[in-house]
Image (cartoon, grey):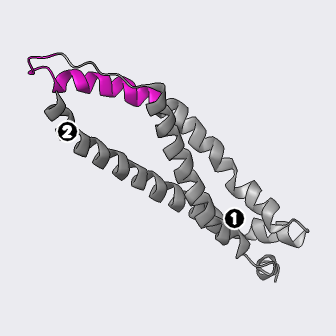
Amino acid sequence: MVKFNALLSRIVSLVTWSSMLIMVVVLYVLVRLVVARQRYSISLLKALGYSDRQVSRLYLDNYLWLVVGAMTVSIPVSLAIMSQVWRLMIVHLPLGIPFFVTLRDVAVMAGLALGAYAVVRLATSHDTRSVPVTEVLKFRE
């Protein structure tokens, strides 16, 4: 059993980190796209007197709810799928190794997802701050 866990630990860590990297890249591209498409609105808000912090909260903090919603759906679904895959993986082994995930493991998964969101939030906060107030005047001419 120790040998089996040692062999699987590399695969599990590879899948975990690669999925986190994919999540960060997709979320970063999504947020950058929204900010790029909403440059006029961001500039208008700044012209109306909203601070950079308020504009950033309005455009970037809503994605926290997207990440939380995705976690509440994806973690139970992935655990259900993985329990079935686990049964297929150990069907030919002469010993029974149960599939279990502790609350600590679920908390680590949620923490990694929220950490990935925090990294993306920090990386894209510069995009909303870099929109000039004069952007709104370009379309008025």
Residue nearest the viewer, comparing 67 with 1: 1
Q: Residues within 10 Å of mark 1 (few under 14, many from 20)?
A: some
Q: Quadrant of residue 121?
A: bottom right
> Where residue 78 is drawn, which disc sits there?
none
| Distance of label 2 from label 1 (alpha carbons) | 49 Å
Residue 95 position, x and y percent, is 13, 17
Amino acid under disc 1: Gln
Front residue of this view, candidates 136 and 49: 49
Magenta span dominant secondary structure = helix
Which residue is the extreme one toward the right?
49
- Quarter that holds the C terminus: bottom right
Image quadrant holding the N terminus, namely top left
The three-letter code of the residue at mark 2 reads: Ala
At mark 2, the secondary structure is: helix
Residue 133: image x %, image y %? Answer: 81, 78
Residue at image point 66% right, 66% down = 125
Identify the residue at image location x=80%, y=81%. Answer: 134
Q: Are marks 2 and 1 in contact (CB under 8 Å)?
A: no
Give the labeled residue for mark 2. 6
On screen, residue 101 versus residue 73, left or right, reads: left
N-terminal of the two: label 2 or label 1? 2
Nearer to us in this view, 40 or 73: 73
Does the magenta run of residues contain 33? no
Place of residue 126 in the rendered image (x, y in percent of width and height, measured from the top left)? 66, 71
Callout 2 crowding tier (Cα within 10 Å): few <14, some 14–19, many ≥20 = few
According to the image, label 1 marks what residue? 38
The front one of 117 and 134 is 117
- Tell me the magenta residue range: 75-95
* Marks 2, 1: nearer the viewer: 2
Q: Residue at x 52, y 55 (%)?
A: 27
